[in-house]
Image (cartoon, grey):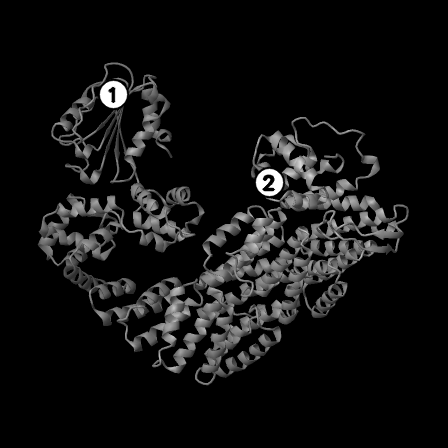
């Protein structure tokens, strides 16, 4: 709430408005930097203030006190009353004790610096006139939401939620400190701002000067109490603070009172400490080294007596106090407690820092490294962990079993969090060999990881063989946790290939096991099964598994598993047509996971597919295959296939047929090597079209044959729909319109049942397109020789396309006639528009317009639209606004580039812009014809 909207602000406004309201005084208190001056500035800009006399006075600046006029409303703003000197304070008291109708006075001060606590105008309190309304307002620190809003205004979307939380925590919400920290972070070239960046920003100069100045103002014998608070770094009780200071009970009490009176320390509900958490860093650095070490030693003694023992804080004080053994014992205890309670990122941070310290002896390093590795494989990416584990593995003195365990977790890290699948695979193979005899339980985990089908360069048969090895090793180990890990991967492998028995395997996962380690593997199994169910086309069941998996992974403290499930949810929203806000959700997810290519891959692919459907072809290429996109060589096979399908489609739309065919052959070869045929659903139709349109009909037929054979016995609705689509695409490419129409409609019905609305609309459009071509071939009865349309294919290529002759085999009844074709195209156009697929909607409208029925044809002459855009101009402007070139728009709308150029020029003139990029945003749909009006009106 702003000042003028608050109760006291409204009261001030009434007085200034001269409505007869009594004079008012508002005492505004707030700690240093909380925004009191900004509040006063806001008051001076009120409309009522503009009609009043405004007087501002800052105490302690040797400026003359203002003279109040005798009549009329007056806004008197006096700042920094806590600095008022012996001459200013009496003068201010006299001003306020004098009766003055129309006076609206605001006094600001720091309560911690008042000479008489709670009395800004000193003692005795002033005798205010009876008609003066006196109010008090406390300026409080910013909330987390307020910090988030300011951060977004300064840094945009590159600040993570963890960074916002750290900003609020370290600054205490004090406005000036937040602003100073953001100023330091603003110039960073990093793509995103993390909590670590906030810590690295240091202490703002204003805060350091204030904190150190207040400490220096204390007598030297009292300063250790402030130093003790800085060393502890958190509020503490009187006795603990005095003990850490080393002053003794009596002197310590006197020092605490002096520090509170001088505002060097403050009292909270939790105890005594620095006014702002970040201030502790400034004071801590100012303490002489030997004294600081002694303070930390005493702090460790104090914390060791607390129950429960705060092991992480105790470890910090032991290390800073030079107590190495105590430090290592506390680190190990803290890390194990954090890991066991699911706080894996906390354990990772503590152990990374510890193991990077050369003071850690080899035997301790060997004991702590596995704790780090076990937390790291379920946590988020950390290159430091990878570096630490890589170095430790090379230690020749490391026991073989420990080396194998570390190599196992390193392999998982390289694959999952870092995205280096080949190196990860090699480490896991070596781990399986090293552990086979000494630790069959860990060997089973390594083998089980190699059984997961998402490795890009290994066949399904290889994964199946590893799974059987893992099952035998797990049985030999007798370890229930290992058996659960293998069971989770068995379910994932079965679900990935559409094995009908996979659902029973998923149902058997021990989601309610009393062992948290088993629940963690069950959560991973659920999330992996959800991802596979999504690709299969079981969208409802995928949603259920995602919900259950996310809940269980959250309870189990498995952030990596949770993030993979969140990425899968974005894919699910894409395929089921929940596109509203999806682009923004993908971009936010990518920003938060940019350093973890495996996790952010789902969001990048979805964002690229959205850009393609919206006609943003340059953006689509950047998201799918740009410099920042993950390497397709390391990408999960289903995502790699979907990406290739999109790139093929983009090349077809741009009439780059040879590029499309090359991508199709390479991508299909990878599918064949992998052998998980259900993952080819988003690739096969486009690969068939690319091969057929470049004349390689035999290769296109081979793709369909391979695809059908690979799906035999598989429960994969999406893939079977794609088989039908592929048959239809081949029939269309060969000019067999009447064969293509029922196949496209069958595919559309299959996609509708999933549901998968975008694929449904694409195949419905293709059915209408082929029906119209069949009608054009022989409008009388649908028989005779038919010429394939120029640039035959789903993307409706322009005049440069090739054509193929063929003979239609059946009459009008086979495809429903032109009426049904128009109905199909009208339905898919509406569906494209509802989804937000701008490019597809424009293409379908253009096709519909080019075959409009004679009875609906426009009268002779061109209709006049005046300053409004015609339907055609609107279509062209929308596509130009997405970034398409004139030639690309021409290919989409079956126009010549010259005609497109003219439409763009007219649209820019009518909309009053010289920028193509602004066209789409400037189109006012409320005053333009409806999208489907273009069906019966020429542009």
Q: How many marks?
A: 2
Q: What residue appears at the point 59 percent right and 65 percent down from the top-left corner?
A: 637
- Looking at the picture, how far across and down is residue 338, in whole percent? 36, 65
- Looking at the picture, how far across and down is residue 903, in whole percent? 67, 35
* Placement of the C terminus among the 4 image quadrants: top right
Judged left or right of residue 555, residue 116 is left
Nearest the viewer among 777 and 444 is 777
Judged left or right of residue 337, residue 506 is right
At numbered mark 2, what does the secondary structure look like: helix, strand or loop? helix
Q: Label 1 near label 2: C-beta < 8 Å?
A: no
Judged left or right of residue 471, residue 272 is left
Q: Can residue 572 be seen in this view?
A: yes
- Looking at the picture, how far across and down is residue 568, in whole percent? 55, 58
Q: Quadrant of residue 743?
A: bottom right
Judged left or right of residue 786, residue 543 is left
Nearest the viewer among 401 and 891 is 891
The mark closer to the camera, 2 or 1, is 2
Which numbered dot is residue 881?
2
Which numbered dot is residue 438?
none
Instruction: Determine whether 925 is above or below 263 in the image.
Output: above
Instruction: Determine whether 643 is above or below 483 in the image.
Output: above
Q: Can residue 340 be seen in this view?
A: no
Chain-order first, disc 2 or disc 1 = 1
Number of other residues with Cα within 10 Å of mark 1, as a class: few under 14, some 14 to 19, many 20 or more: few
Instruction: Determine whether 920 is above or below 837 in the image.
Output: above
Number of other residues with Cα within 10 Å of mark 2, as a class: few under 14, some 14 to 19, many 20 or more: many
- Looking at the picture, how far across and down is residue 28, in whole percent? 26, 33
Instruction: Determine whether 375 is above or below 794 in the image.
Output: below
Q: In which quarter of the image is residue 867?
A: top right
Which numbered dot is residue 131?
1
Check the image and name the residue furthest to the bottom.
437
């Amino acid at each position: 709430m702003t000042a003028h909207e608050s109760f006291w602000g409204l009261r001030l406004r009434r007085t200034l408005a001269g409505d007869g309201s009594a004079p008012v005084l508002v005492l505004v208190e707030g700690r240093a930097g909380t925004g009191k001056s900004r509040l006063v500035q806001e008051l001076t800009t009120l409309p009522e203030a503009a009609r009043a006399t405004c007087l501002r006075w800052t105490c302690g600046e040797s400026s003359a006190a203002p003279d109040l006029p005798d009549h009329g409303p007056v806004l008197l703003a006096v700042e920094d009353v806590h600095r008022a000197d012996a001459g200013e304070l009496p003068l201010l008291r006299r001003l306020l004790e004098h009766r003055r109708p129309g006076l609206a006075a605001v006094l600001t001060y720091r309560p911690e610096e008042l000479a008489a606590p709670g009395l800004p105008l000193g003692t005795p309190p002033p005798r205010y006139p009876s008609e003066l309304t006196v109010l008090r307002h406390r300026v409080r620190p910013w909330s987390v939401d307020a910090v988030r809003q300011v951060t977004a205004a300064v840094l945009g979307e590159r600040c993570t939620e963890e960074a916002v939380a750290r900003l609020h925590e370290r600054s205490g919400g004090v406005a000036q400190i937040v602003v100073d920290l953001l100023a330091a972070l603003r110039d960073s070239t990093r793509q995103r701002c993390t909590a670590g960046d906030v810590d690295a920003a240091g202490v703002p100069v204003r805060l350091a000067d204030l904190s150190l100045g207040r400490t220096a103002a204390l007598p030297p014998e009292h300063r250790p109490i402030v130093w003790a608070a800085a060393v502890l770094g958190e509020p503490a009780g009187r006795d603990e603070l005095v003990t850490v200071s080393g002053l003794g009970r009596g002197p310590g009490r006197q020092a605490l009172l002096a520090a509170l009176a001088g505002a060097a320390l403050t009292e909270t509900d939790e105890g005594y400490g620095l006014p702002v958490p970040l201030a502790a860093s400034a004071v801590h650095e100012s303490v002489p080294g030997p004294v600081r070490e002694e303070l930390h030693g005493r702090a460790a003694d104090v914390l060791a007596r607390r129950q429960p023992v705060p092991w992480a804080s105790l470890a910090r004080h032991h290390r800073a106090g030079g107590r190495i053994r105590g430090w290592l014992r506390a680190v190990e205890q803290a890390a194990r407690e954090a890991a066991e309670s699911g706080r894996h990122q906390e354990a990772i941070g503590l152990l990374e820092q510890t193991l990077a310290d050369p003071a850690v002896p080899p035997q301790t390093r060997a004991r702590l490294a596995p704790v780090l590795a076990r937390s790291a494989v379920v946590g988020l990416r950390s290159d430091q962990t990878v570096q630490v584990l890589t170095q430790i593995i090379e230690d020749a003195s490391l026991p073989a079993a420990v080396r194998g365990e570390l190599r196992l977790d390193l392999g998982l890290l390289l694959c999952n969090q870092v995205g280096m699948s080949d190196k990860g695979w090699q480490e896991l193979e070596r781990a399986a060999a090293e552990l086979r005899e000494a630790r069959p339980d860990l060997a089973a985990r390594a083998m089980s990881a190699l059984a997961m089908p998402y490795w890009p360069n290994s066949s399904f048969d290889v994964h199946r063989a590893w799974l059987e090895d893992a099952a035998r090793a797990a049985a030999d180990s007798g370890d229930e946790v290992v058996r659960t890990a293998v069971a989770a991967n068995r379910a994932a492998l079965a679900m990935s290939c559409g094995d009908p028995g996979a659902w029973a395997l998923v149902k058997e996962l021990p989601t309610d096991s009393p062992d948290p380690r088993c629940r963690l593997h069950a959560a991973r199994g659920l999330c992996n099964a959800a991802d596979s169910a999504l690709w299969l086309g079981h969208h409802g069941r995928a949603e259920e598994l995602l919900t259950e998996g996310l809940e269980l992974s959250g309870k189990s403290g498995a952030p990596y598993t949770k993030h993979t499930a969140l990425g899968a949810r974005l894919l699910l929203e894409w395929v089921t047509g929940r596109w509203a806000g999806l682009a923004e959700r993908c971009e936010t997810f990518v920003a938060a996971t940019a350093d973890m290519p495996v996790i952010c891959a789902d969001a990048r692919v979805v964002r690229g597919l959205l850009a393609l459907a919206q006609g943003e072809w340059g953006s689509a290429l950047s998201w799918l295959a740009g410099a920042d996109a993950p390497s397709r060589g390391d990408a999960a096979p289903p995502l790699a296939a979907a990406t290739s399908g999109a790139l093929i489609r983009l090349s077809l739309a741009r009439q780059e047929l040879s590029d499309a065919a090359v991508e199709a052959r390479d991508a299909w070869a990878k599918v064949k090597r992998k052998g998980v045929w259900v993952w080819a659903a988003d690739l096969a139709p486009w690969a068939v079209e690319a091969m057929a349109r470049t004349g390689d009909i035999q290769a296109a037929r081979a793709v369909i044959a391979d695809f059908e054979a690979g799906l035999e016995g598989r429960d994969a609705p999406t893939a079977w729909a794609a088989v039908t689509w592929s048959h239809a695409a081949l029939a269309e490419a060969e000019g067999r319109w009447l064969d293509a129409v029922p196949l496209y409609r069958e595919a559309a019905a299959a996609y509708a049942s999933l549901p998968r609305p975008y694929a449904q609309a694409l195949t419905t459009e293709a059915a209408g397109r082929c029906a119209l071509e069949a009608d054009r071939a022989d409008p009388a009865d649908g028989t005779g020789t038919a010429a394939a349309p120029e640039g035959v294919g789903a993307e409706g290529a322009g005049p440069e396309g090739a054509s193929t002759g063929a003979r239609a085999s059946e009459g009008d009844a086979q495809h429903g006639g032109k009426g049904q074709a128009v109905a199909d195209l009208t339905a898919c156009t509406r569906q494209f528009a509802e989804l937000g697929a701008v490019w597809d909607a424009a293409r379908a409208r253009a096709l519909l317009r080019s075959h409009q029925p004679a009875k609906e044809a426009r009268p002779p002459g061109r209709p006049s639209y005046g300053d409004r855009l015609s339907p055609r101009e609107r279509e062209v402007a929308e596509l130009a606004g997405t970034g398409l070139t004139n030639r690309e728009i021409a290919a989409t709308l079956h126009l010549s580039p010259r005609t497109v150029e003219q439409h763009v020029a007219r649209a820019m003139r009518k909309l009053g812009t010289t920028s193509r990029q602004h066209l789409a945003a400037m189109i006012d749909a409320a005053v333009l014809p409806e999208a489907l009006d273009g069906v019966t009106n020429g542009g």
